[in-house]
Structure formats: C-alpha cells, structure tokens
Amino acid sequence: MGPVQKNRTLIFTYGTLKRGFPNHGLIEDLMLTGDAIFLGVYRTVERFPLVCGPFHVPFLINLLGHGDRVWGELYDVTAKGLERMDELEGTSLGHYERLPIEIFPAEEPADHGIEKRIAAAVGVEAYYAHRSYGEELWRSNGEKGFCRYSEKEASGYVRRTERPQNISFLQQIQLFCSSSSSSTSSPVAVTD
Ligand code: PCA
C-alpha cells in the first residue's frame, strides 16, 4: 500500500455504488487507476432514514435521529474519482447532495492505514437526497426506512438508461412522492 495522499475524500456509499450493486462498475473503474480504494464496511454513528424512491433508487435523508444506523462501504477517492461520482449522483442537478457524515467500522477495516487515511482526508461524506425533496420523500415512505440497501431493495432497480426519457429525475421523485402519500391529491399526470 503506497503512502497516504492528500486531496482525497472519503466517501461512504450506502446504495448502488456498493459491491454487487448496479453502479459499482464506476468504483471498479476508479479502483483500476488508483482513484478509489476500498476501506471497509462502516455504519453511520447517528440514525438516518434510508428509503427507496422511484425505480428503487436508494436515498439517505439528512434527518438525523430518524430511521436506523445505516450500513455502507467506505472508499478513499481522488479528486478525479470524486468528480466522476458527483456526475453519477447528479450533484449539480440537485439530485443528491454530498455532505459530511460520521461513521464507524462495522467490521475489521480492510486497510490498516485507515487512521492515517482518515486524518489526511478532507472529510467523510455521503450522497444524501437533496434537501429540496428529502423530507417529503421520507413522509411519502410512511417514515419507514431500512438500515441497509440489500438485494431485496435493489431487485426492482431500474437503470437510468431504461427509465422514461420524457421526464426528469426530479419530476420522477415528485411524482413518486405525490402518488405514494395518502394526504395529497391525485398524482400529477405525465402525459404529453
Ligand atoms: N448511490 C450512492 C448514493 C445513492 C446511490 O445509489 C451510494 O451508493 O452511496
């Protein structure tokens, strides 16, 4: 293992980026060039809602104290790796927002230099549901979450390329929220 480098960010992944899940290919690509390093299985110190939205896409919601301590995987990524991940998560489009999170090792860390890596990193961050819809998404899931995005949750996942192209991701989220919450009126029609 080479020296711990600066300008790296630790990313806690909890959804489709994890090993065995549909977007892990991106991390695999990044690992080939040293732009991502797997550090181990971690859990959040605090409880957070973890829910599924449209297409079984997982969302961690920034509502501390609700839900469970969430399980995920920690990666050390370079600036280049981070850029690719931000792009996938649509941070500039308001899909997810990358914010700090506190975590602890749930298993023996994969990397023994972990303390040094944590010290050298800019911070540990995760991709949360954007604040513009996070709370609403939590409510429309009946305020029920899970502690781990597992095969069961992921089994209905629809890849971006296979989703309807005539409606944006944020519109899909709105549609999901309005059709699954009992308190609101009928869902918005998305016909042309
Ligand atoms: N990808 C990111 C955020 C949600 C998702 O599916 C992750 O796995 O952490």
Image (cartoon, rainbow, N blue to C red):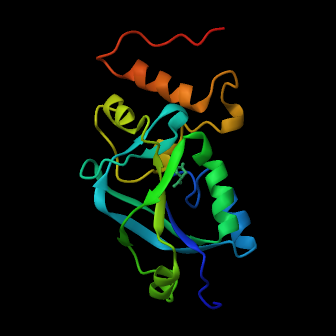
Q: Is residue 145 above or below residue 1?
A: above
Position of the N terminus by quadrant: bottom right
Q: Is residue 188 above or below residue 33?
A: above
- What is the number of callouts on the image? 0
Task: Give how far across and how far down residue 49 sits, in percent.
Answer: 33, 47
In the image, farthest residue toward the left:
65
Q: Is residue 150 above or below residue 55?
A: below
The residue lying at 30 percent from left, 18 percent from top is 182
Quadrant in the picture for residue 108: bottom left
The residue lying at 58 percent from left, 61 percent from top is 19
Task: Give how far across and how far down residue 95 sits, in percent.
Answer: 55, 41
The reply to whether residue 30 is in sight is: yes
Q: Is residue 106 above or below residue 24?
A: below
Q: For this rendering, which residue is in front, 89 or 99? A: 99
Position of the C terminus by quadrant: top right
Locate residue 46 relative to residue 58 in the image: left or right: left
The reply to whether residue 14 is in sight is: no
Q: For this rendering, which residue is in front, 103 or 156? A: 103
The residue lying at 51 percent from left, 83 percent from top is 120
Quadrant in the picture for residue 106: bottom left
Task: Give how far across and how far down residue 174 sits, in percent.
Answer: 48, 25
Task: Give how far across and how far down residue 179 sits, in percent.
Answer: 42, 18
The residue lying at 44 percent from left, 36 percent from top is 132
